[in-house]
Amino acid sequence: MTAHPSPTTTLLRPRFAPFSIPLTGVVPPVCTPLTPEREVDVPSLIRLVDHLVDGGVDGLFVLGSTSEAAYLTDAQRRLVVETVTGHVAGRLPVLAGAIDMTTPRVLDHVRDVTAAGADAVVVTAPFYTRTHPVEIARHYRVIATRSPVPVFAYDLPVSVHTKLSAELVLELAADGVLAGLKDSSGDLGSFRSVVTGARSHPDITGFTLLTGSEVVVDSALALGADGAVPGLGNVDPVGYVRLFRLCRDGDWERARAEQERLCALFRMVDVGDAARMGGSSSALGAFKAALYLRGVIDCPATAEPQVPLSEGEVELVGKYLAGAGLL
Amino acid sequence: MTAHPSPTTTLLRPRFAPFSIPLTGVVPPVCTPLTPEREVDVPSLIRLVDHLVDGGVDGLFVLGSTSEAAYLTDAQRRLVVETVTGHVAGRLPVLAGAIDMTTPRVLDHVRDVTAAGADAVVVTAPFYTRTHPVEIARHYRVIATRSPVPVFAYDLPVSVHTKLSAELVLELAADGVLAGLKDSSGDLGSFRSVVTGARSHPDITGFTLLTGSEVVVDSALALGADGAVPGLGNVDPVGYVRLFRLCRDGDWERARAEQERLCALFRMVDVGDAARMGGSSSALGAFKAALYLRGVIDCPATAEPQVPLSEGEVELVGKYLAGAGLL
Amino acid sequence: MTAHPSPTTTLLRPRFAPFSIPLTGVVPPVCTPLTPEREVDVPSLIRLVDHLVDGGVDGLFVLGSTSEAAYLTDAQRRLVVETVTGHVAGRLPVLAGAIDMTTPRVLDHVRDVTAAGADAVVVTAPFYTRTHPVEIARHYRVIATRSPVPVFAYDLPVSVHTKLSAELVLELAADGVLAGLKDSSGDLGSFRSVVTGARSHPDITGFTLLTGSEVVVDSALALGADGAVPGLGNVDPVGYVRLFRLCRDGDWERARAEQERLCALFRMVDVGDAARMGGSSSALGAFKAALYLRGVIDCPATAEPQVPLSEGEVELVGKYLAGAGLL
Amino acid sequence: MTAHPSPTTTLLRPRFAPFSIPLTGVVPPVCTPLTPEREVDVPSLIRLVDHLVDGGVDGLFVLGSTSEAAYLTDAQRRLVVETVTGHVAGRLPVLAGAIDMTTPRVLDHVRDVTAAGADAVVVTAPFYTRTHPVEIARHYRVIATRSPVPVFAYDLPVSVHTKLSAELVLELAADGVLAGLKDSSGDLGSFRSVVTGARSHPDITGFTLLTGSEVVVDSALALGADGAVPGLGNVDPVGYVRLFRLCRDGDWERARAEQERLCALFRMVDVGDAARMGGSSSALGAFKAALYLRGVIDCPATAEPQVPLSEGEVELVGKYLAGAGLL
């Protein structure tokens, strides 16, 4: 009669996933275009999805950090997932963040995003509250038991203030709780421990390993990652797809050159004046300004309380685009 | 035609508050009793409210950290506020947390908790996302403009990972954005800066200054705080009310003795084995175990993914209660 | 034949201290006046000591944070201790910081400062290196065994990046390892746990409990501290001595007024432009500028690589002095 | 007449370095063998140097974290540098850490280690004290002006609690202040910014870029690093030299296999029981146990207050060695 099954319940493994396992390639975290009134701009979002699909990406990740999931209301989150899954119509897998503080709140988002058509959910450790490795494991076990779709762990210490250990991820992968990992920790050594651990573990198959980095995608692929979830992929999906293919083909020299071009473009995230705004305002403001300048979206607004870029800062974004051959 | 008014809009000041200004005394953050299935246990919640009101408290704070707000679903949050405001029926002011990551999501909670009858909302700085003092100010200004009830700032760096500066709080108080502060920073020196700054500022009147500490309530009141929001007040409301009155009457010697008795009782928050659970599981588990042992609530369960206390740990809670003369 | 005695060696307890136990009153951390060439300015240091002794202080703490111990070479550190102990000549106890990263390096400083006449040493937990409570205990046990004078623990998480737990301090106090605590953690609740724990522990006698705060000295004394080590005491020793006496006499209302006057004066620590310098440059620069303006020291220079205050910032310090009646 | 030259003094550039510029290859941070009495074990240190030189390394780094510099007294530090430079006798460059809290104290170490024959010094940002980018720049400028040998920046946020920004490192490199960077930040993306920035900067030539990682050496070399400073290189210098050569030759597939073998070996750093010791005790204890088991050093003791590995933990180290083919 318990509503929450015991977190030690054995899972049927492998859970069916509506996409090839593991997921490989470029899976950009999709920006959420907003109107000047800070409502979801559905036509712009659809154009952005087309821009990404036309760019050759292999999947889409909605409601992640780059999507401003932390800023979107529940109604806006649902609208985003419905819009994207409806427009994609099964051509690509759509992963959706279920970003909230703890298990019960995450479960509500899992219900919402899967009802809206998400093919997998991406979930962080608990945040805001004080937590513990035992509780993090319990969190993922409860969620996996109740999610109708595969669960990816989202390692984002800058937001969550906890790092998922390689040991914990591998334990949960081996038990069939997790289907994959999006690593945005910035710690490539720790990510490598998961990659090599997963490859050599007898009980782990089809586990998807994605880096959330924009700037060491070649390195991550070289050491065995399956793909990348680069926020900058909104701005230049073609570049990241090209980078992925060069790496897949083992052409490391040209891959490095392409990665360096993208690194130079990525410097746009620092255009915002640090005396006047935080890192999110600057980075997401720059991505959206770039999409606006490239004609993909109608308005570069970011959600409240982020501070808008100044005109001069937007011009600087334009210069980065020009420098990368994108304007 | 903007949905979000400009954050610089002047507020009518002072905003009407349905309680005396400033709010003084003991305003416990109300635990949220759960059933074994982790649903809100309404009868237990009502008994807990009676236990607090009968203990002589001066207001109630629902949906704060001690209430497990981070773990409650939106439906559960609404049920809690409706239950408490309905049962209190105006006898005491009811403050409600509107705890979420950013402005738009907080605004949804403000709408919900005020629809459910809350007399004021308690709001943290943005979290999970990277932020900045300019953005924090913008956040509170937007929320204050759109909230039908007074807004209290909630300074909780252990969760939010940002400390509200005294300077920022005073600026927002002077502009009529904030009606009060709940300080759970543990930094009494910084809190004192706000207290003395608010007392001497020509544009600040009726600003409510509450400490979130359990263990230096006498100190906070001695330096000018209006009241306290002690989680342990769930377990021993009579003790905190007695402490407040002793301080109000300037009987510092007896106040110190009462405070020390409560400090000894507060040690229950560490009963949980740190190898097996985090600080939230231990502290909230202890408060709920104490309420269960005192016969106030029917079940000591905490929300997922918190780890339950063992039988031995619950016994230890009982010993603390006995030591404080509460069993 | 081991050079380091076993850290579990039992100590003879209580260790003889060349001052009354516990040490009570105001024990300012003595600034280290420097010449324009950044050498120790011995005549100014002697004048500063006279200024403090004449102000009525009860002891002196050299080579703490306010003394710029982190910036002084070993030769400078020795010169400071010799100068101060030589000039004081036993009239007051002189405590000296032995600030370094780990046990062996701290032991060298203990040897140096005690050879130079220090009556007690003040020691932090290990820093720079990763540490652990077991190692912190081991650190203090080894040092206490080898120190010819009593050892005080220095809790300064902002520098050490570890907080000493009340439990650990009390364990070491009960075992005679520690003779006292200087608490600069800013966490009055935790300090209270040590104070009340020490008062009630059968094996702890004569343990000296000093707060390092400038702004909640009245609170700390009210809850049982023996004294204070306020950096601002360099600037206004008379004020802190007056505050201590008011607290000792239980005149809390006048104590609070005096404390608030000192809090207003303390705001000088923020005069430095945060875009151009760190908190140490600003706070220590302000203390030294104040001593210079009051005619106590000849030069307000701080050690490299701290950034000097601008002329306008020094003027602002003067305004704080004037506001507090000190110019 | 100022003892400290102005930090803006122009440097003669490039400073002469007694080794080829940039320095490339494997430059292990040399462990400091200790006797049971915790004195420097000179014969073991000489055997360790031979073990490394025979393994084919390209330089030696003494007095870094792996050398327990934070635990060595000044006399021990001097003895280490003299022993190593004397034994190496110019066959390889010897870099020495000058690890201390601030500029004046670092300068004393610079004097000592260069008197003892070090070919370059490796210096962190200020620590223990609160700092600021302006002060960090000033720190390096003063040190470079007064150091007779080239200065490398040591980026070690886990110890220093500040991250050196790519922008700051490049500014100091362009001004001839820094001769190189040892990056132990774990943040490969940031390191890449320095690498690509330095390669493309018109004013930067011969800047040495070394990764301090053990586990992504192949990645760092692939993106343009000059070499590596792996602590684990004490245990298996041959492996790291082989890895470097494979990378230099562009044999990325075999490089990856060798790197993965070394990653598996590196797991020895976690043998220590986290309930009983910190990360330094565990990792340095494991390296020394491995060197002891391999017959290179006579005693695996680590400095106080580190906790020794248990017998079982040492056995586990042996298993890692056996697994890597080193026993």
Image: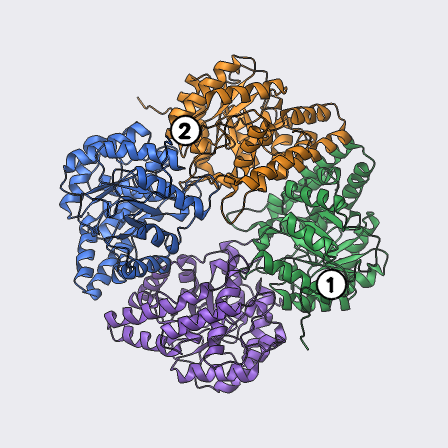
Chain colours: A orange, B blue, C purple, D green
**Chain ID of residue with mark 1:** D
A283 and B125: which one is in front?
A283
Residue B317 in sight from this viewpoint: yes
Q: Is residue B89 left or right of residue D217?
A: left
Q: Would residue D254 appear left or right of B178 to someone viewing this image?
A: right
Seen in the picture, residue C321 relative to B20 is either above or below; the reply is below
Residue at image position (52%, 23%) is A176
Q: Is residue A41 left or right of residue B217?
A: right
Label 1, secondary structure: give it.
Answer: loop
Verify CB contact (< 8 Å) between mark 1 and mark 2: no
In the foreground, B117 or B314: B117
Quarter residue A209 falls in: top right
| x, y percent for residue B161 | 44, 46
Number of numbered tags placed on the structure image:
2
Identity of the amino acid at label 1? Answer: Thr
Q: Where is residue D293 shown, x and y percent of the image?
A: 71, 48
Q: For the residue labelled by badge 2, is the local secondary structure a helix, a strand or a loop?
A: helix
Residue type highlighted by circle 2: Val
Answer yes or no: is residue A149 visible.
Answer: no
Where does label 2 land, which residue? A106
Label 2 neighbour load within 10 Å: few <14, some 14-19, many 20+ = many
Q: Nearer the viewer, residue D36 or A215?
A: A215
Indicate the quadrant containing the N terminus of chain B: top left, top right, bottom left or bottom right.
top left
Locate residue C74, reporting x and y percent.
62, 73
Identify the residue shown where x is 65% and y is 27%: A240
Distance from the alpha carbon under mark 1 to that under mark 2: 57 Å
Q: Are marks 1 and 2 on the same chain?
A: no
User: Where A91 falls versus D223 (above or below)?
Assistant: above
Side of B70 where B300 appears, left or right: left
Residue D10, numbered circle:
1
Q: Residues within 10 Å of mark 1 (few under 14, many from 20)?
A: few
Q: Label 2 marks which chain's residue? A: A
